[in-house]
Image: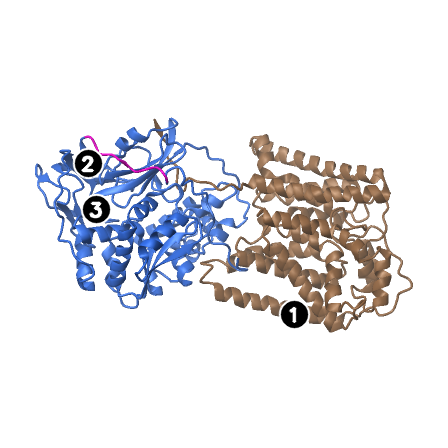
Amino acid sequence: MSLFLGKMCERIPGHKSATDHESILDIMPTKEVYIPLVAGNNTNFEILVNEGDQVYIGTKLAQTKTGFNVPIYSSVSGTYTGQTKRMHSSLRPQNHMVIQIDHKQTAIQAFEPIQYENASAEELLEFTKNSGLVGLGGAGFPTYVKYLKPEGIHTILINAVECEPYITADYKLVMNDPKHLIDGAKIMKKMANAQHAYICIKKNHPDMIDIVKQAAQGSDIEVKEVPNVYPMGWERVLVREVMKKEYDKLPSEAGVIVNNAGTAIELARMMEYGEAIANKIVTVSGEAVKRPINVRVPVGMPVKEIFEQTGFNTDSVRLMAGGPMMGKVIPNDMFVIDRAMNALTILPGTVDDAIACLRCGSCSDHCPAGLQPVRIANAVKEGNLEEMERRQAMSCIECGLCTYICPSHIEVTENVRKAKRALALQKKK
Amino acid sequence: MKFNFHVSPNLKGKQTTQQIMRDLTIGLLVIFLCACIYYGMNYGMRYVLQLFLLLACSLLTTLVCEAIYAKILKIDIKTFLKNSFGWVTAIILTMMCPISITPFALIIATIFAIVIGRLLFGGFGQNIFNPAAVGRAVIFAAFAGATTDLVTSATPTATIASNYHWLPATPEVFDSFLSEYGGFWNLFLGNYPGAIGETFTLAILVVGIFLIVRHVIDWRVPVMYLGTIIVMTAIIALVSGIESYNGIPALLWYPALHLVTGGIVFGAVFMLTDPVTNPTSAAGRVFFAMGAAILTVLLRMKANLPEGCLYSILLMNMFTPMIESAMDGNQLKIAKKVWITFACFCVLALGVSFFAGSSVEPVRELNTSSSATNGATAFEMPTIQEEVSL
């Protein structure tokens, strides 16, 4: 512990044992899937199929018109019946493509497989670009963009940390398919022309470390054990821990590219089999779930149908798309599983019991970005935009640790969000 | 099926403010118990009853003040009392007073501490000054002579300040001081008169470690405060050329003497650490503690007060907003600024030490007229002061 800095992280109970040893449950939607036309902030898509068209698993459905190139492939076989506006897990109504499924699940090859051992870095990059692969850790950022400028990159970090409580989807993915994880790491290393590739796993998963080490034998991929703290899986914290480096905006400034383990596995599978993202493993867990379990569902699966299988314990719940720390609470069950989603967390309803701030500074001590949430909150209270900016509210990634740690149960993160919103609004003007 | 909305995150840690205050209360009561044992064994039951009377007066006054405040603002009284934690202020204030204080003076001081020190600022979490210190300052200013017939002997702080200028320079002089209080270990254990809670250095340190481990107080504050005092007094020992004692060099025994005498350990653990009046950043708290240490040493060595802990706390409270504002921003990016500030504080501490060490006359010969005065405690005592300054 440093004299002038706090811990900048915290050990949070993982609650992972509810789901990590259960086998994966396959669920298919009964009638329709709704494929969200969303890629990060981008919702400007060109539809490549016509209403009434027969589509198969792997049929290219749409492509972004502006911004980064992200194609979307079908996750089921059936008939495309048009677009509809539905609630999206980003809490906004978005366009979704409706596909009536025929329950045959016929698959076609989405693109030509490629042998990564023989391909050049440029070919690999081109493949990744066409594959529509986005970061599967939650952000949904197109993967290929990180590899556009590989100059100065010396290390690839594969993020298998999964530091959000309750979620075991990545754990399941890695345990079931360590070979493709290693392949994915090799591909990424080659694509960035990096010297090292480390797979980062939490110390408290010895079984996972063993299995990955075994799979990595004979290759130049190494396993790095990292402490069991939150938010170890944030790339800034991961680079700090493994590389002992800080950076300003992007990890590439420290010569590092960070990719999620699920993304690496998916990339390796795409190259080997020529198939696009169709299915997702999603952890359904939390105190209000009757049967916590990992489910495998096609992209676009309505969550309501998942809950028919898992059930609720109580009548009043908080439903999160994602984990309890960073996942957004969605006040209904009308949304669908998107490509970057890996968990549904359901906790019992709660009553707010916040009391006055005692200025203990715990939020500042624990902030992984080195910010002072309490000071930003003060600036919000005063409506002082200048101070909000000086206190660097914009560097907050809303990991939620400040609210978690606050002994007075104040929604600190929400206060910082308010500062971010105010600053963003001011910028627009 | 009801899907509630709630802003993320949706998990809460275990520690609550209520728990922090409960731990702090337990810690304070342990020290209060030490006081009961000390006064019970040395002076008898009447003194113990007086301790309880004083504590009860302060607690009741707090209760009444806060209840009236809640009534006026039309807040539910029970909830307000529960979440205002006024009792902590009351206990600390009581423990800072000498046992000879009249209940009346303590009641007035409590009113000032609670009403002016806390409620007028907006209640818990809003006050600028440590409320207990405000109350103590009121007693210092207005009730110096308000003492009962409960008599204890002179406090070592008063004695060392008035008779030894805080600088007993030879083993003989130091021995004569120690012999008045039964030796160094007696001082360390707290077996001597002083403010009710301040004397039990060992017990306070143990409670302090407990509170640090439980994350009730930040380790930086007591460690940096006491650490800076140790370093500064060691420098003073070197500069003033005081002699080693029974083979222990002056730069070891002299800082130890400062730690076991008076209220700095109590202040370090229970008062400086008050989060409400601290800067919120780790670096800020370090500078806050260092500043308080520098002021304490300066006041002890050079001012007309036997001891500077109380005033160093109040003075540093005033600097808290300034330190806060200076330490704003991304803590990783201001690292350089933090180190420069740290260096400045070190230079300041060094300067004060040299100044005090070279300008205070060490006492090398036994002063035959070392008659001690009554009732002086580390947290003040103006009556002796006048004698000293005369």
The color chain A is rendered in: blue
Residue B219 x, y percent position in the rendering: 59, 54
Q: Determine which quarter of the picture holds residue B345.
A: bottom right
The color chain B is rendered in: brown
Q: Amino acid at mark 3?
A: Ile
Label 1 packing within 10 angstroms: few (<14), some (14-19), many (20+): some
- Give the SS element for disc 2: strand
- Give the SS element for disc 3: loop
Choose mark 1 or mark 2, whichever is in front.
2
Q: Kindly indicate whether the residue at mark 2 contacts the one at mark 1 (C-beta within 8 angstroms).
A: no
Asked whether B267 or A390 is in front, the reply is B267
User: Can see residue A394?
Assistant: no
Label 2 packing within 10 angstroms: few (<14), some (14-19), many (20+): many
Q: Are marks 2 and 3 on the same chain?
A: yes
Asked whether B99 or B209 is in front, the reply is B209
Most common secondary structure along the magenta stretch: loop
Q: Residue at (35%, 55%) from the top-left corner?
A: A213
Residue B61 x, y percent position in the rendering: 70, 36
For disc 1, the chain is B
Q: Real-space Cα distance between discs 1 and 2? A: 73 Å
Q: Is residue B74 left or right of residue A251?
A: right
User: Can see residue A341?
Assistant: yes
Q: Which residue is mark 3?
A: A277
**Which stretch appears magenta?**
A21-30
Q: Are marks 1 and 3 on the same chain?
A: no
Residue A127 x, y percent position in the rendering: 17, 56
